[in-house]
């Protein structure tokens, strides 16, 4: 994330019906990235336009996490979330020491659950509060 696009990222907003599952604005995720050492924010681009936000981090056990993923409401339904996850999971899997990629989602977020499952994420049986933790094991190197 560079100084030129953080404002565009901060204004990213999901569809109204998704706000119980993700922050109302990506600005919340930017603050988490700036104030905590856990998360790293990335802008999601389609061409020259900023269309979303995602965070990634590494847990103490070495697992890599994806969080704070939001595609701007008007840009949804174009395959951007799927493309983002494919790109980010490939990049994370190539990082030194990555043995698992994890994310968490609310069980009522059926659209997200279908997307994650279609990309190979499998629920671990563990939870983070009310959210289901799912994992993708990277291909062996």
Image (cartoon, rainbow, N blue to C red):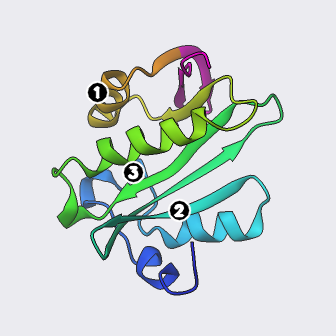
**How dense is the environment of label 3, judged by Cα within 10 Å: few (below 14), some, or many (20 and up)?**
few
Q: Quadrant of residue 139?
A: top right
Q: Earlier in the sequence, mark 3 or mark 2?
A: 3
Q: Is residue 6 above or below residue 124?
A: below
| Region in magenta | 124-141
Report which residue position mark 1 lands on. Answer: 114
Q: CA distance from mark 3 to mark 2?
A: 22 Å
Which quadrant of the figure contains the C terminus? Answer: top right
Q: Secondary structure at mark 3?
A: loop
**How dense is the environment of label 1, judged by Cα within 10 Å: few (below 14), some, or many (20 and up)?**
few
Determine if the magenta segment contains residue 129.
yes
Q: Earlier in the sequence, mark 1 or mark 3?
A: 3
Report which residue position mark 3 lands on. Answer: 20
* Residue 42: numbered disc: 2
Depth check, mark 2 against mark 1: the one in front is 2
Is the magenta region chiefly helix, strand or loop? strand
Q: Secondary structure at mark 1?
A: helix
Query: Along the horizontal axis of the image, is 22 left or right of 28?
Result: left
Q: CA distance from mark 2 to mark 1?
A: 23 Å
């Amino acid at each position: 994330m560079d100084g030129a696009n953080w404002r565009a990222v901060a204004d990213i907003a999901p569809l109204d019906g998704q706000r119980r599952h993700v922050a109302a604005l990506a600005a919340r995720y930017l603050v988490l990235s700036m104030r905590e050492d856990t998360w790293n924010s990335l802008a999601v681009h389609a061409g020259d336009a900023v269309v979303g936000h995602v965070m990634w981090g590494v847990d103490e056990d070495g697992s890599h996490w994806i969080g704070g993923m939001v595609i701007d409401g008007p840009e949804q339904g174009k395959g951007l979330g799927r493309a983002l996850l494919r790109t980010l999971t490939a990049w994370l899997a190539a990082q030194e020491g990555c043995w698992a990629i994890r994310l968490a989602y609310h069980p009522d977020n059926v659209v997200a659950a279908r997307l994650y499952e279609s990309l190979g994420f499998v629920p671990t049986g563990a939870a983070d509060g009310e959210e289901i933790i799912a994992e993708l094991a990277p291909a062996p190197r």
